Image (cartoon, rainbow, N blue to C red):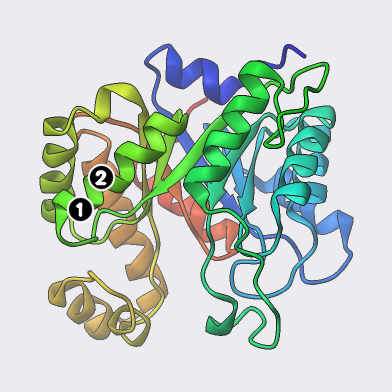
Amino acid sequence: MELRTKLAEKLESGGFTVTVECVPPKGAARDAVERFAAALPSGVDAAIVADNHEQITASALACAAILAATGVEPVLTMVTRDRNRIALQSDALGAAMLGVGNVLCLSGDHQSLGVGPEAAGAYDIDSVQLVQALAALRDQGRLLDGRLVEPKPSLFIGAAAHPGLKPPELAMIGLRKKVEAGAQFLVTSPVFDETAFREWMTALRSAGINGKTSIIATVYPLTSAEQAEGLRGVPNETVERLRSADDSVQEGIAIAAEIASKLRDVDGVRGIHVMSGGSETAAAEVIRQAGLSRP
């Protein structure tokens, strides 16, 4: 199966990408996904579809398929917390069948942190093993049990990166495993401290990882000082800016746009992802203020 995604072509040709977060609706409202697609600003290359991140929502695979049908290129998030290897491989084949070729492999936050404390987690394989499994499925048509499938799915495989993890040497070992397993792009957790991120990127280049994958840096418009205080890695000056602002929501958007405009110039950064918690308006404004819009 030959399915070359626009995201893959752009990153592999050296282009700069802009992606946004798509949070599936809590109900069965297909039109909510279609409205999201229609509201996307110019210049967005793909939408990363969240998979039951903070609460139970409509299927990420279903929403990704709807986006693809509207002409918006999706990136399907696949979380190993909720599915065993059977379901994960089946979903990957189904995604390719539906025209969804970009996948982002995550382990996922533990269910006890909010999405479903009463649920049992699967955790049959971790995110590194999922990347490896999908790469074998794409390249060899081989399932984890050794059986072959035909035709092979065409997949562009990504994973997560966490610039704030300490010590950096240990974090680089984990990233190297993901890249060696087959991760073609890495999406970072939200960046709030540009200086610390630049240091992380220097370590990434020194470890020889940057040239083997594409780094997409994430920004997140905070809405209040209280929210900022509850997150790791937010500088004190950012908290105080939000606290003293007349409109903390607009200030959060301005801060995220400032960070995005700086990150795009960091050596090795190949794209910006705007994580907005479901606020398409905020995402669009960050993109506009950061100068990331295109005709």
Relative height, residue 276 to residue 43 (above, below)? below
Q: Nearer the viewer, residue 194 or 169?
A: 169
Determine the image quadrant of residue 211.
top left
Kindly report the distance in space between the C-alpha atoms of the residues bearing marks 2 and 1: 5 Å
| Residue that sits furthest to the front in the current view | 146
| Residue occupying the point 62% across, 33% down | 134
Residue 218 showing in the rendered view: yes
| Residue occupying the point 14% across, 77% down | 236
Which numbered tag is attached to residue 154? Answer: none
* Helix, strand or loop for disc 1: helix
How many labels, in total?
2
* Helix, strand or loop for disc 2: helix
Residue 20 x/y as whole percent: 53, 47
Residue 78 x/y as whole percent: 64, 50
Relative height, residue 227 to residue 268 (above, below)? below
Relative height, residue 249 to residue 67 (above, below)? below
Residue 34 showing in the rendered view: no
Q: Would residue 266 be found to the left or right of residue 150 on screen?
A: left
Q: Nearer the viewer, residue 282 or 81?
A: 81
Q: Where is mark 2, residue-wise?
A: 173
| Residue occupying the point 53% across, 58% down | 107
Determine the image quadrant of residue 138.
top right
Q: Inspect the image, locate mark 1, and give the three-letter code of the amino acid beneath it.
A: Leu
Q: Inspect the image, locate mark 2, and give the three-letter code of the amino acid beneath it.
A: Ile
Q: Where is mark 1, residue-wise?
A: 170
Quadrant that contains the N terminus: top right
Residue 22 x/y as whole percent: 63, 53
